[in-house]
Image: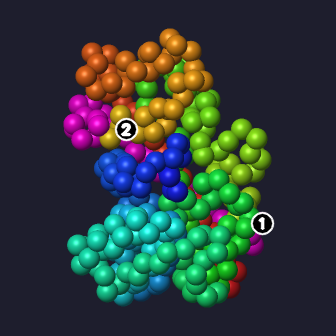
Amino acid sequence: MPASTTIAGADKTQDSYARQLETFEALRRPLIMEALAWLALSPGSHGLDAGCGVGQHLELLLKAISPGGRVTGLDLSPDLLARAGELVKAKGIADAVKLAQGDIYGLPFEPASFDWIWSLDCAGYMPGAKAAQLAELTRVIKPGGRLALMAYSSQQLLAGYPGLEARLGATRTGQAPFKPGDAPGDHFLRLPERLGQAGLLAIEAQSFLAEFRAPLDPLIKQALLELMDMRWGAARAEVSVADWELFTRLTRPDSPDCVLDTPGYYGFFTYTVFTGQKPA
């Protein structure tokens, strides 16, 4: 999802970004667990979490490859890595997890270092030269190893207001991290083409659904409101005054018109995984 180095939208401070990740985790964690079960990573393998952020998924990755697996978490931000280090220690998994600072365009690893690479809302999703990015990731995967890239791909959250949601989605912030002027082939859902161009084989795709039904737990309600602010909160200048006033009424927690308090409310978002195998 959007913000800072791994999720779309306006630039955030590291503290606010880390807090945003922690809030959003309540919404997407079950979906990520489903995705890891679908990937069926090999027990005892060694993988890289490229763009690990605050390290929320290192434990999930480690469980997916137990027993005997190891995970390396990589991020560009030393502040986020420091938070990841604290989390790894608190979870008691420091013996099986290594953290490294680095850029996915110039990974600090030898060729063929990993059995697999996982990246969530980062590689293949955020702006940048996709071909160079995928070539560098592929370089450090062992022959026969896998690359798995997962990112936010759609939502229907403003039940009853499809026109408003469509207009918000058509704004720059609603399309982020894809931008007007970007090549169509750089869109995340065109990633299978890029994986093929990078020489990967056995390319697969799978989408996973996170659903939300009334009555909502207060923490889930707050997280959904923050998600809607992440998606559309910077769109004010691109929509009409009437649309913005309606959006504000629908997404203010104390508003009598808050869409999340609608009896029978239903909404969802999806994440999509693309995976391919390096030739043996």
Does residue 120 sit above or below 99 in this rendering? Answer: above
Q: Residue 199: say if magenta.
A: yes
Residue 63 percent coordinates (x, y): 34, 74
Location of residue 230 by image quarter: top left
Does residue 149 sit above or below 17 in this rendering? Answer: below
User: From the viewer's perspective, is 234 left or right of 134?
Assistant: left
> Which residue is at 62% across, 29% downward?
170
What is the span of residues highlighted in magenta in the rendered image? 196-222
**Helix, strand or loop status at disc 1:** helix
Specify which label sits upstream in the sequence, 2 or 1: 1
Q: Tell me the quarter of the image containing the C terminus.
A: bottom right
Report the Cα–Cα distance between label 2 and label 1: 37 Å
Which residue in the protein does label 2 denote?
Answer: 226
Location of residue 192 by image quarter: bottom right
Which residue in the protein does label 1 denote?
Answer: 197
Would you say residue 264 is visible in this rendering? Answer: no
Q: Residue 16: say if magenta.
A: no
User: From the viewer's perspective, is 154 left or right of 204?
Assistant: left
Q: Residue furthest top?
A: 242
Residue 137 percent coordinates (x, y): 63, 73
Location of residue 193 by image quarter: bottom right
Does residue 240 sit above or below 133 in this rendering? Answer: above
In front of the other: 164 or 80: 80
> Which residue is at 37% across, 25% downward?
251
**Which label sits on residue 278?**
none
> Which residue is at 29% across, 79% downward?
93
Residue 173 percent coordinates (x, y): 57, 36
